[in-house]
Image: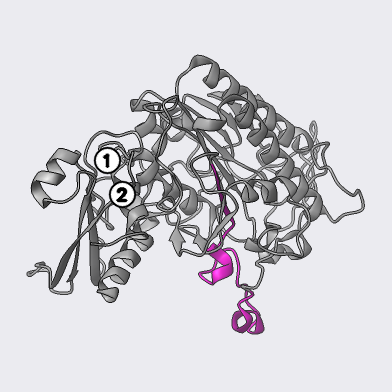
Amino acid sequence: MAWLSLKVLLVGVSFLGCLYPLVDFFFSGETRGQKPNFVIILADDMGWGDLGTNWAETKDTVNLDKMAAEGMRFVDFHAAASTCSPSRASLLTGRLGLRNGVTHNFAVTSVGGLPLNETTLAEVLREAGYITGMIGKWHLGHHSSYHPNFRGFDYYFGIPYSHDMGCTDTPGYNHPPCPACPRGDRPPRSPERDCHTDVALPLYENLNIVEQPVNLSGLAQKYAEKATQFIQRASTSRRPFLLYVGLAHMHVPFTRTPLAAGPQDGTPYASGLREMDSLVGHIKDRVDRTAKENTFLWFTGDNGPWAQKCELAGSVGPFTGLWQAQQGGSPAKQTTWEGGHRVPAVAYWPGRVPINVTSTALLRCCFTPTVGQLDSTEPYRLSVWSITRPSTSPVVPRVGCRQELNGRKTETIQRERGGPPSSVHVTARFWDERDRSNLLPYNEFSVSAEPRAGLRLSSFPVTLALIDFSRSWK
């Protein structure tokens, strides 16, 4: 039966996402029945080796290293894409780019964005009574209905795309160096490739532009203040909340600000890394002071470092793609080499997430299906081709595999399976879709796992099943 256990486990690990080994669902009397809060922090262009606990050469992530020591670190976690917009679209929808329609980055001139028929995590949780907020880089469309306020977020504060996609008065460090915005009637300087001087970078608060061009030297401080204010106000309201923070770090350009504590003779990248780490520390501290026992905090990156930026790019750690590099190419961002999509990942939830644990599980960034179902009382069915809902996409892989997870009330399971009251029944089917006229499974099996006492199957069907797959089999 070892092969059977391994096959089901691999299916679950590959297609469920990142949360299955995380959470201890044995609630105390004080927190039982409360809806959990979610804080998702997404770094930009951060390399796997930029996290100190991943790579000993990195000394600039004190707060993140502490968070990893107090939670769980994932060393084989992969973003859904190696560029900004596709990765963010997958994070918020739980669907890969070929399914959600976002396969390339959106430009300043783009009139569209994340397709309007896609459901975001914020929309799912807002319908469940959550206060939803987004702070930072959006990059999923900035016109009309594609704006964050129309995609499920009650509150938005941030920039519509990357902060190198518009000119500023404080352009910072970049390759090539970009000029500041032209002033008055002076004609713009002739920019180098990749420099944007035609549109000043805007800073939004909800639907209003509150600053243009953005002062980059104060942006991190503003993000920290707005994030902590949102957490405080949401906690005071006693409503559950979702806060999604899309950091500007570690994307170029870099600028030194008061948040960047540490030696002043460091490189611009090291200074930016300390600034990002300090910002994350501010958010975590606020969570700890206001909603520590009922808030899940997740930190990860959208893709690997931008190697073309030379010393302004991060570290891929050991995933150097030696063959690719020897051919003169990049093994990082914008490629499918491991350095392009293998990213840092840390989970933190005191009393729920195990302390100081390193997971080597192979995981992909499909956060939405699990989080979106943590508070659902409906049975949840997960399909690998359509994680959030049935898809009408004509794209059909040559070889298909689908996983179905049925979480039902314990009485129903006991009656159907004749097993213990808290057992979960899971069916995995494999079939060959090269012949579309015959989609009958050619291999089918069932496994029943028995969770620990105290679990509420009707509330946690998806995460529950795969947690216990790693522990016991029947």
Please give the name of the residue rendered at 71% of the width and 42% of the height, measured from the top-left corner. 167
**Residue stretch rendered in magenta on the structure:** 320-348
Closer to us: 71 or 241: 71
- Which image quadrant: the C terminus? bottom left
Q: Is residue 62 left or right of residue 248?
A: right
- Residue 319 on the magenta span: no
Q: Secondary structure at mark 1?
A: loop
Q: Marks 2 and 1: which is nearer the front?
A: 2
Please give the name of the residue rendered at 54% of the width and 70% of the height, measured from the top-left corner. 338
On the image, the x and y values in percent for residue 40 come to 53, 40
Which amino acid does the dot numbered 1 rest on?
Leu
Instruction: Return the mark for residue 208.
Output: none
Please give the name of the residue rendered at 45% of the width and 60% of the height, measured from the top-left corner. 363
Q: Residues within 10 Å of mark 1 (few under 14, many from 20)?
A: many
Q: Residues within 10 Å of mark 2 (few under 14, many from 20)?
A: many
Which amino acid does the dot numbered 2 rest on?
Pro
Residue receiving disc 1: 457
Q: Is residue 361 left or right of residue 384?
A: right
Residue located farthest toward the right when viewing the structure as drawn = 265
- Give the CA distance from mark 2 to mark 1: 9 Å
**Does the residue at mark 2 contact the one at mark 1 (Cβ under 8 Å)?**
yes
On the image, the x and y values in percent for residue 371 come to 39, 41
Please give the name of the residue rendered at 26% of the width and 62% of the height, measured from the top-left corner. 395
- Residue 326 on the magenta span: yes
Q: In the figure, 141 relative to 145: above or below?
A: below
On the image, the x and y values in percent for residue 420 come to 19, 48
Image quadrant assignment for residue 36:
top left
Closer to us: 25 or 19: 25
Residue receiving disc 2: 451
On the image, the x and y values in percent for residue 129 come to 37, 23
Q: Is residue 366 left or right of residue 4?
A: right
Q: Secondary structure at mark 2?
A: loop
